[in-house]
Image (cartoon, helix red, strand yellow):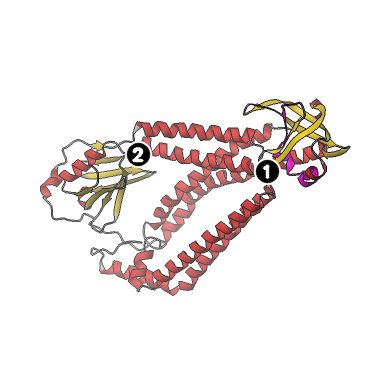
Amino acid sequence: MILDNKKFSEEQKQIITSIGKKYKDNKEKHLRKVNVIALITILIFMSILTFLYLLDSRRISTITFLILFGSGVGIFNYSKAKKKLLKVLSGDDYEVGLYYANKDDEVIGNGYKMFKQTRVGFIALGILGLVVTIPMGLISYNESPVDYNSLTEITGILEEGYFDADDGIQMRLEGDDTVYRIQSIYTVVLDIDRIFDEVDLGDEVIYRIGEVKVVNGDTLRDVYYYEADSVEYMNYDLMMQGYNRNHNLGIVVVIVFGLLGVGSIISFFVYKNYILIMKQEKEKFDLSIKNKVIEFDRDEDLFELTSKPKIATYAPRWMIIFMIIMIVGFFIGMILSLIYITDPFNRVGIPILCGVLALLCVVGCYDGLRNNEMIDGDYFISHRFFKTKKFHIKEISRLSVTGGIATLLDSNNKTLVNISTFTKNLDKIIDRLNEFGVLVETDMG
């Protein structure tokens, strides 16, 4: 929304009123839009839950929790959005026009404003898609099933055995400290209940096992064939079924995130070169205020202090170093989880989580290294998150520092810029603004 301004001309006020009337006349259309968005959200949510169920149907308790939690959040947000829309549209034409003026397709500048709001999302999704796709694609391309002929066959007496959805089946034999494991990528195709019902501790079992591994100080060998009392509970066919299922899942994830990455990048250029141009061709209403400098009761001579040197802020170096360490850590975590985690549920979820967190740290690191705030003469310039704001210091009515954030506000109490109090040289910025006559309210000592 935009704030009412006494500098709006009568023509501009009529435009705002006409925008409000247009939205009020199409009230049912906007209510249907809320319903459609809710329906699409439900379909996406149910698609994700279906994918998780197919990934591992034994995690029904987790999926049930997600259904209940997601339903609660969805109903709350849907109800809140609908109430807000009805409240907004209950105002007079001018009030409704103020609310929608910065969204209306016919207002000059809104098309580019929308592009600026969405381009970061396009770029972030593109990077995320490629960050997940490239390492997972390489791993999926290079992985192959175990060489069944190279396995070692052993016989022993079952002393201990348990099943865990993440760790698979883990067993020990009498007189042997080795942990024998059937990985979770194979247990999803095995009849776990039958194994634990029919095989008892003390029974003789036959395994075909892989090479020795050391995990958390324990000697571990993976089992690819399991027989007890002449019954095969795992064999070559079941092993290949589990491997193919896991491999195909990896390919699906690569395809989905590859399409997400490439599609987001393509969408960015399509939006920039075609959709934005079409939107700008529809724009005809000018709601800009020609004289944006607001006069205040201050010593106007202070605004002639343009000869003073520039002041620029910068991010603390410890914060940049910390974020670089986090980026490397999350990327290594993503790679290691793809290599060593065998549970399909975690093999997808953990790399995605690591990729998202690494991406956030990359954005934060970029912002800290490339962007800052600056006072140049009697202008305040802010470079943050791919966006630049420049305005005359006369437009700043008040600077309030509270809760770790320094906020610059105009005469309508509208936020111009937020700056973290961790920022270096913020104290110099505050002192200079105070010289210019800006009212400073701060909880800093």
The answer to whether one can see residue 261 in this image is yes
Part of the protein shown in magenta: 175-195
Identify the mark at residue 309; answer none if there is no mark: none
Nearest to viewer (mark 1 / mark 2): 1
363 over 51 or under it: above or below: above
Q: Is residue 88 left or right of residue 244?
A: left
Secondary structure category for the residue under label 2: loop
Query: Contact (CB < 8 A) between labels 1 and 2?
Result: no
Task: List x then y, in percent, for residue 208.
Answer: 80, 30
The residue at 26%/53% (across/down) is 409
Is 176 part of what is drawn in magenta? yes
Q: Looking at the picture, tell me which residue is in the foreground, 75 or 170.
A: 170
Is 439 part of what is drawn in magenta? no
Estimate the spatial distance between the alpha carbons at disc 1 and disc 2, rounded to whole Å: 46 Å
The three-letter code of the residue at mark 1 reads Ala
Q: Looking at the picture, tell me which residue is in the foreground, 428 or 126.
A: 428
First in residue order: circle 1 vs circle 2: 1
The answer to whether one can see residue 247 in this image is no
Residue pointed to by mark 2: 371
Task: List x then y, in percent, for residue 210.
Answer: 75, 28
Secondary structure category for the residue under label 1: loop
Q: Residues within 10 Å of mark 2 (few under 14, many from 20)?
A: many
437 over 361 or under it: above or below: below
The three-letter code of the residue at mark 2 reads Asn
Task: List x then y, in percent, for residue 440.
Answer: 20, 48
Residue pointed to by mark 1: 165
Q: Farthest residue toward the right?
A: 230
- Name the quarter where the C terminus is drawn: top left
Q: Looking at the picture, tell me which residue is in the foreground, 374 or 60.
A: 60
Task: List x then y, in percent, for residue 320.
Answer: 39, 33
